[in-house]
Structures are given as structure tokens and as C-alpha cells.
Image (cartoon, rainbow, N blue to C red):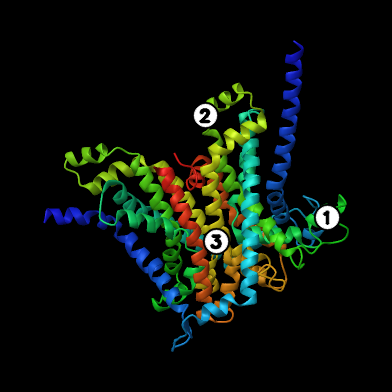
Amino acid sequence: MNSIQSRQTKRRILQGLVIIALLIGAFYAAFPVVWMLSSSFKSNRDVFAYPPSLITDSFSMSAYAAVLTNPEKVRFFTNSYFVALLVTLFTLAVGCLAGYSFSRYNFFFKKPLNMLIISVQAVPPITLLIPYFSLIVTLKLFNTYAALVLTYMVLTLPYAIIMMTGYFNTLPKELDEAVMMDGGSRFNALWRVLIPISVPGLVSVGIYTFMQAWNEFLFAVTLTKTMEMRTVPVGIALLMGQHSYEWNEMMAMSVLGCLPVLLLFLFFQRYFIAGMTAGSVKG
Amino acid sequence: MHKVTKKLAPFAYLSPTLLLLAVLSLLPIAMVFSYSFLNNVVMEKNPVFVGIANYIEILTDAVFLQALYNTLYFTILSVVFHLILGLAFATLLNTKLISPLARALFRVVYILPWVFTATIIAILWRLMLSPNGVVNYMLNEVGLASGPVEFLSSRQLALPTVTFINIWAGYPFYMVSLLAGLQGIPSELYEAGRIDGANGPQLFRFVTLPQLRPIILSLAMLDFIWTVQQFTLIWMTTGGGPIHVTEMLSTFTYKLAFSSYEFGLASTSAFIILAICMFVALFYVRQQRAADE
């Protein structure tokens, strides 16, 4: 009896310690986020009010209104959405085709090509940047959406191919064969059978791809020039460069700037996490 | 005829990929490699072959060497603390001592830093770490500091500070992978350990860690490659300053190319970064293949 009781107290103490540790961790993880949100609702003067507080008298949506009524800033967002969605679409299409090839065929060069695709992921963007600058200028794509979409695909495609190859590998070959027995082509098998059942994989890859394209900074800042071609990360960076900081507007832009990824994370948590863990967890 | 089309079919599916890889990764790497032996490239009309002169100049440049040191400091500390925090949080989230709902909620909160892009992380921390910002207020209130601390513009604190920010930004990646790893360890292993009389720390040392080893290795190598390349966070917090104390290989290279227009030297430096990343990637590929077999 006594030992059960002492065991229970021990468990209680342990439970208490775990909860305290979890709360400290949550503060570390979330306080900056809360602060960003809070600052976006303040007047610019109150952002540095002393003593600081989460909610001030100046609480209002005016910073958001200022951002959303400024056509230049709204343009950053439409650019980012446009580029990120195009990159996601093209990456999924090209990635599925390549993944199908790797999964269903044996061909000369398969292994070295696979190795090459894995290694491309490790190539630093800064190394590609200098040749990209001259290539994009030569191809007359400087300051266009095409420059961003094409270069981003180099960053997103290897991951998509590796993931889709793995996904198709889990689907039995009999599926394709059944379609072909009915007189369908291989492409039909891919398009009508494999892709529909691979939606979970496509969602994971799509989210990861969108996030990478949405966040990209280095290529965007170098391969575009005019304000109407700038994406959100670059737009925020340029506003920071101006000498009078409108901190509340910056924070409102930041909140809006992380909204799409945050929503993807909250609504597709399982797929979001599956995409994150794919590089390191096997099986 | 039929045989030929059959042989070509896989390449048809691969053609967009092959085109993209050839034009936008193999060609650029060949270009940057050839630029690294030239002077007057990209912006000038008459490139001059200079042999390994660029490599000698870069490898003896004091700022490059400092950037190399800073990058290693930044990267190694980031990897180590990402691993420590990631493992600690994953262990906390894996505990059966709290309800599944609470665990799910904490997991959402703990992943938050991962959804923010580097530009936003940089300006958010600039706001919080400013001399009259909220972090200074808190440190002064609890007595850990007296007077405002210039975190990002002090020569002593700037490098540890950007490293701290990067640790905050990156640990969730480790946490979710390690959590998946922890959940994949068969409970029989722990039971067997307990029967053999192992206590908590011993179970961790002799069951958990060996089981997580392949994941930890993969994570550390991926993170090393990514962190060595980190540009945006540094560019947006300190820009490499003050006086190069947070200069990284990436910011050094970028400035050489797009501020000084020394594209030859910048290519040399960019190629050295590529070599470092490829060296680590080699181990990563071997590790992944071992896991596949």
C-alpha cells in the first residue's frame, strides 16, 4: 500500500516537472511569435513603449490597413503567391514524371542519375547565384517571373523526385499492368491510377515545395530589380533598408507574410510533418 | 523499333528534369568552376586566365579566413544546440505523463519557429533584441543585465546572438524527426532493458540513443550543409558586421560579387563553399544508402 502511494507521489512530482519544462519550452518557442502579433496591433510609437506590454491603448488594425491599402506592398504578396504556386505546380508535375521513371523502369545511368539528383540538394544557392546572374541576363529573363520559377525549381525538384520515387515504389506494379491490360498506355496508368492514389504524398511534397518557394530570398533579391517584381521576403528586406522604420507595419507584413505557411501547417499538420521528417527518418 | 522506344521511354519521362538539371545545375557549376580561374568575368568583356591566383588570394585573405571561422562557429554550435533542444523537446512531447491533447497542442507551439521565413525571423529578433526592446527589458527586470545590451552591434555579442537566433529558428526540424524516431522504437526494447535492471538514464544511453543514431547522423549532416549556406538570416540581422565579426562564407561571397563586382574571386569563394558542402553530402548519401539497404 505504502509503496503504491509513494509511487503515485513520485509520478505526480515527475508530472509536475514535465509540465514546468513544457511551459518553459513553449515560452521559448512562442514568445517571439506572440510579440510579433502584439506589435502588429500597436501604434508605431507604442512598439518601444516602456515598460513593454502585450496589449496597449493603441490596439488597432491600422498597421494591417496601411499594408493592405498600399498597392506596392500588396504587389509583393501577389508576386509571392503567383511564383510559389507556379513553382509548386511545375515541381509536382515534373517530379511525378521523373519519379515514375525511377520507380518503374530500369535504365542505363539510373544509379548515377539518382546520385546526382540527391547531390544537387547539397549545392549551395550562393554557388549557383553568380552563374545564374549571367545565364538569366543572357537568356533575357532578368527581372521576370520565369527567372524565379526556373531557378526555384532547381531547389525544389530533387526533393520532389526522391519523395515521389519512394511513394510510387510502395505502389504495386500490378496496378499499372492492370491498366495496360485494358489497353491503356503507361502514361494513362500514371495519370489515372498512380497519381490519384498518391495524393497524400503529393500534398506533403506540395507543401514543402510551396514553403521553399515562398521563403526564398537570395535568388529573388538578385534576379529581380523593379519594385513590381519583388516578393514578400525581399519586399520586407527593402522596407527595412529605409531609414524610418514603421515597426508596426513591418510586423503586420510579417504576420501576413507567414500566414500561408502557418495555415498550411495548421490544416495539413500530418502532411506538413511527413514532409519535414522525410530527409532523415527512414521507413 | 519497338525496342528502341521502350529503351527511350524512361528518358521521355525524365526529359524535363534532365533539361533543368543540365541547364540550371551542371552548366552553372561548370561556369562557376571556370570563372574561379578567371579575372574580369561576368561584367567585363575580356576575361583573363589567372590560373590558381584567385585561390591563393582567397585562401590568404584575412576576411575570408575569419568568415570561414565564423561559419564553422555558427554551424557547429547550431548543429549541437539544435540536436540538444530537438532531443529534449521530442522527449518531453513523447511522455505519457500528460494527455494526448496537451501533447498535440504543445507540439503545434513547438513547431512554430519552423513556419517563419528567415527574413521575418531576422527582423522580429532585431525588434526584440534592440537596446530598448523587450528582451533587454526582461533581462534588466530579472537582474541579468544592467543597462541596455547591444546584442547585434556589439563585437563580442553579435556572433553568439545570430547563432542563438539560428538555433531558435531551426530546432523544430530536429524535434519532429526525433519524435518520429522515438515513436518508432519498439517498446519491447525498453521492457527488456528494465528486466535487466536498467534505470532511466541507462535506458536512454543504451536503448534510445543507439536507436536514434541513424536519424541523428542524417539530421546533423543535412543541418550542417544548410547552415554553412545560411545567407538570409545573417544578411538581414547584421549584414556580416560589425567589422566582419559575423561575416559568413555566404555573405563574404555575395559582397565580393554584388558589391565589389569581383566575380572571379567571388566564384572562387563560391566554389570553395560548394566543395565543403559536397564533402559532407558524400557522407549523407552513404548514410542514406546504408539505411536503404
Tell which residue pokes out farthest to the top in this image: A1
Task: Bin the neighbour count of mark 3 within 10 Å (Cα to Cα): few under 14, some 14-19, many 20 and up.
Answer: many
A1 to B11, vertically: above or below: above
Residue B145 is tagged as none
Q: Residue furthest bottom?
A: B46
**Tag nearer the camera, 3 or 1:** 1
Q: Which of A123 and A222 is in front in this view?
A: A123
The amino acid on which the numbered mark 1 sits, given as a three-letter code, is Tyr
Secondary element at tag 2 = loop
Circle nearer the viewer, 2 or 1: 2
Mark 3 in CB contact with mark 1 (< 8 angstroms): no
Q: Which amino acid does label 3 sit on?
A: Phe
Residue occupied by mark 1: B137
Where disc 1 sits, the SS reads: helix
Q: Is residue B209 visible?
A: yes
Which residue matches tag 3? A77
* Both labels 2 and 1 in a single chain: yes
**Marks 2 and 3 in Cβ contact (< 8 Å):** no
**Secondary structure under badge 3?**
helix
Packing grade of label 2 (10 A; few <14, some 14-19, many >=20) is: few
Give the spatial CA distance, label 2 vs label 1: 47 Å
Labels 3 and 1 in the same subunit = no
The quarter of the picture where residue B258 lies is: bottom right
Q: Residues within 10 Å of mark 1 (few under 14, many from 20)?
A: many
Identify the residue shown where x is 63% and y is 36%: B91
Cα separation, mark 2 vs mark 3, equals: 46 Å
The image shows residue A85 at horizontal and vertical percentages of: 45, 56
Q: How many badges with numbers are in the image?
A: 3
Rendered location of residue B150, percent (x, y): 79, 64
